[in-house]
Image (cartoon, helix red, strand yellow):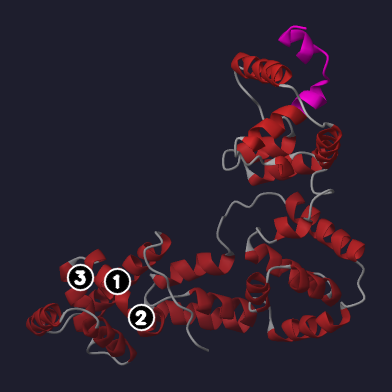
Amino acid sequence: MSEDSRAAGLSRRTKAAIIVRLLQAEGMSLPLSELPEAQQTALARDMARLRYIDRATLHAVAREFADELEGVGLAFPGDIDRALAALEGQISEHAAAALRREAGLGRDRDPWARLAELDPGRLARVLEEESVEVGAVMLSKLPVPRAAELLGRIPGERARRISLAVSRTTAVRPETVQRIGQAILERLEAEPPSAFTAEPVKRLGAILNVSPAATRNRVLEEIEAEDANFAEGVRRAIFTFVNIPARIDPRDVPKITRAVEPAELVRALAAASRLGEEKAAAEFILANMSQRMAGQLREEMEELGRLRPEEGEAAMTAVVTAIRALEEAGEIVLTAEEG
């Protein structure tokens, strides 16, 4: 019997089992878990059914497999889930969500894994709008770091009620938890795309960061009179020259000083050293660089003399802008300020 006739008498499933076993024998690790479960179980049954394959049949199946591979010009994902993975970052998230809903994706997968990947601001909004029982299920199912972050984003009274409701989640059935996760995911994925990528508090915080102190304080006071929670969020998003000692790692000071024009840095330090809260920030910067450079900067600060208030504020804003740019580039990390 020829090798070709040996291979022709086998089903494609049997040939697939032979190829998988051959590749495993060669030490290759195959991502079989990515196959649909029905195909995984069928493959396992076929491998269990086979006892041994003679060398001629093995050669025939391997040659046929190699010939098929050589004849493939281009391979496509084969299903919408893999197609979306291949197109990630190239099509909009809203279009991807619509395709998932259309294909019914997520019904056979854990919705909580997808929810854990979403923007914390969107999840925090769900915590504020849904019932405390749903919020308790969310906190219980999401990864602990993400749950802690979300708890810190919602008002204190709401956070207290949801935290207490966690004690009542013991009797919630798994299928109920799955339905809750699916409903939240469908709601969020059905939302129309936003024209803005950043949250409102971050957008306003970025604007106020580079605004004059008088403007910043006046705006915050007026916002607080209308919406205390929003004002508090904006305050947390703001980073000013005063926040440098509390939120900058001393080891990052050299990076910051290199990112600021030397003349601008001298003006910022000179202006800050003659003010109240800002003086501590200036001393923090000078204390965390080489003594030679700090001494040189102090001499230049003395020679500079007094600056007009607007000149000093503009220079300190330049330092803050440089810090924000370094943070966005991932070169430094701003620590959370205690309290």
Q: Earlier in the sequence, mark 3 or mark 2?
A: 2
Q: Which residue is mark 3?
A: 264
Q: Secondary structure at mark 3?
A: helix
Q: Is residue 312 left or right of residue 89?
A: left
Q: Is residue 128 visible?
A: no
Residue in front for this viewpoint, 223 or 327: 327
**Quadrant housing the N terminus:** top right
Q: Is residue 74 visible?
A: yes
Residue positioned 25% across, 87% down in the render: 283
The vertical placement of 11 against 242, above or below, is above
Residue 200 in percent (x, y) is at 58, 65
Q: Which residue is mark 2?
A: 244
Q: Is residue 248 located in the magenta-colored stretch of the structure?
A: no
Pointer 2 or 1: first along the chain:
2
> Which numbered circle lies on residue 319?
1
- Is 54 in front, or is 192? 54
Amino acid type at mark 2: Ile
**Along the viewing direction, whichever of 327 and 27 lies nearer the viewer:** 27
Work out how far the residue at label 2 is from the one at label 1, CA to CA, in angstroms: 10 Å
Q: CA distance from mark 3 to mark 2?
A: 17 Å
Viewer-side label of 2, 1:
2
Q: Is residue 262 left or right of residue 48?
A: left
Q: Is residue 47 above or below residue 211?
A: above
Question: Marks 2 and 1: CB-CB under 8 Å?
Answer: yes
Answer left or right for 241 relative to 143. Answer: left
Amino acid of disc 1: Val
User: Is-magenta flag for residue 7?
Assistant: yes
* Quadrant assignment, res 7: top right
**Element at badge 1?**
helix
